[in-house]
Image: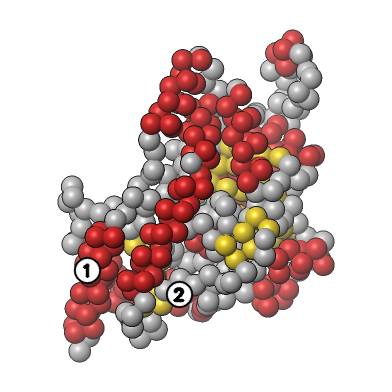
């Protein structure tokens, strides 16, 4: 792709973010400070939860939850095969086995009708992902989790601000995790946030992210805090978010509604422009869901193969249109095949969808003209591929 290419994604960061980051630099307090606490409150409140625990990435947040819930060797965790690999890797970090449930072809989230069959006496948690930000079935997962008394962890890394039946993403399970990588709804550069109503769980996660140090109530003196700095009652990690990232997050949250409206209008333009393209299945959102768009992913119809799709994506990139194959199935990634013996055909719906998806450029200031150009290029690439197949 050349210098004038339309990128796949682009963060929306401006003067407010710069100003707030500059304030942090000038304050001299770059880590463990008030900006992180402010950002935690903003995200927790958006997710309708009482606690937010800021971390250095979404992956780190999921790993902390596995540790805090004492999930380990011999345990099973149910999750989706159709996601970014980071939704499943933390299960493997702690020595547990991922048990995948095939997805629903419409929503691309785990099929709730197949979930119960995957539960065994070894199931220690369900990690439910809102694929591409779509919150469908979260209420159904929560009901099944409650029935079997298994904790539901929401990997809502792609769904900040989405809601289902009026309930915000992040609030369906025992805990949720958001991610703030630059392609997400908001960004802190790198960063993530655990949200929960469970005070004990929040405190364990706060301790684990901070090298296992104890947490203190707001009333604790500076002396108490300093006195315990080198005391580590548990083995922890350094998964802290720094103050500069938190400042960016606070600035982004101030602009949240305006940015999500913009994303909605970009998605609408795509849908209007591509609704007549027969070779494509467009994303659909159930009427009871509200989705803040994370990416714009279209799917080729079933008469296209994975090779056709890859050639179309290659063609888009050659014509300076950023695009990607979101997402290859997790169970078919080499370490999952080698370690757990997963095979092609294990989750046919996820595999069939994954072989035909194309993520198109998606960011806040994408113009109607650019969308038109992207869609024209896509249609030409599809036609070319159809012709080459005879
Ligand atoms: C579904 C899902 N889970 C987990 C992650 C991991 O987040 P991060 O990149 O912040 O570690 C991501 C983001 O990339 C994601 O999309």
**Quadrant of res 325:** bottom left
Q: Earlier in the sequence, mark 1 or mark 2?
A: 2
Q: In this figure, which residue is indicated by the disc labeled 2? A: 353
Residue nearest the viewer, comparing 363 with 3: 363
Distance in Å between CA atoms under marks 1 and 2: 22 Å
User: What is the secondary structure assignment of the residue under circle 2?
Assistant: helix
Residue denoted by label 1? 377
Residue for point 38% across, 31% down: 15
Task: Depth check: give the residue in front, 336 or 150.
Answer: 150
**Where, by quadrant of the figure, is residue 64 drawn?**
top right
- Quadrant placement of the C terminus: bottom left
**In the displayed structure, would residue 83 be above or below residue 10?**
below
Q: Give how far across and how far down residue 383 sits, in percent.
A: 22, 80
Side of 202 relative to 382 (left or right): right
Residue 183, x across and y down, in percent: 42, 49
Task: Report which quarter residue 140 is drawn in.
Answer: bottom right
State the residue at coordinates (72%, 12%). 222
Compared across the picture, whether 235 is left or right of 350 comes to right
Q: Nearer the viewer, residue 222 or 258?
A: 258
């Amino acid at each position: 792709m050349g210098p004038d290419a339309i990128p796949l994604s682009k963060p929306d960061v401006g003067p407010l973010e710069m100003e707030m980051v500059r304030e942090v630099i000038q304050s001299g307090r770059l880590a463990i400070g008030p900006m992180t606490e402010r950002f935690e409150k903003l995200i927790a409140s958006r997710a309708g939860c009482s606690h937010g625990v800021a971390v250095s990435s979404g992956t780190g947040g999921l790993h902390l939850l596995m540790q805090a819930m004492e999930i380990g060797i011999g345990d099973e965790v149910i999750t989706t095969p159709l996601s970014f690999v980071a939704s499943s890797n933390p299960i493997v970090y702690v020595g547990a086995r991922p048990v995948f449930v095939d997805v629903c072809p419409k929503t691309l989230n785990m099929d709730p009708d197949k979930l119960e069959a995957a539960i065994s006496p070894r199931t220690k948690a369900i990690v439910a992902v809102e694929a591409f930000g779509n919150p469908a079935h979260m209420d159904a997962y929560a009901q099944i989790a409650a029935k079997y008394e298994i904790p539901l962890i929401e990997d809502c890394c792609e769904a900040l601000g989405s809601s289902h039946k009026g309930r915000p993403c992040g609030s369906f399970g025992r805990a949720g995790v958001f991610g703030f990588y630059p392609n997400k709804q908001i960004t802190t550069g790198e960063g993530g946030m655990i949200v929960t109503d469970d005070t004990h769980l929040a405190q364990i996660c706060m301790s684990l992210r901070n090298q296992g140090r104890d947490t203190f109530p707001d009333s604790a003196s500076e002396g108490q805090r300093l006195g315990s700095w080198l005391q580590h009652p548990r083995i922890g990690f350094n998964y802290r978010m720094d103050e500069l990232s938190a400042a960016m997050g606070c600035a982004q949250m101030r602009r949240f509604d305006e940015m999500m409206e913009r994303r909605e209008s970009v998605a609408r333009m795509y849908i209007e422009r591509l609704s007549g393209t027969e070779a494509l299945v467009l994303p659909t959102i159930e009427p009871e869901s509200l989705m803040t768009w994370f990416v714009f992913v279209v799917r080729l119809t079933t008469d296209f193969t994975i090779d056709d799709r890859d050639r179309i994506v290659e063609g888009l990139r050659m014509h300076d249109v950023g695009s990607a194959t979101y997402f290859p199935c997790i169970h078919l990634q080499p370490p999952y095949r080698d370690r757990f013996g997963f095979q092609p055909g294990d989750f046919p719906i996820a595999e069939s969808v994954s072989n035909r998806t194309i993520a198109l450029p998606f960011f806040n200031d994408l113009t109607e003209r650019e969308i038109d150009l992207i869609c024209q290029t896509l249609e030409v690439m599809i036609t070319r591929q159809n012709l080459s197949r005879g």
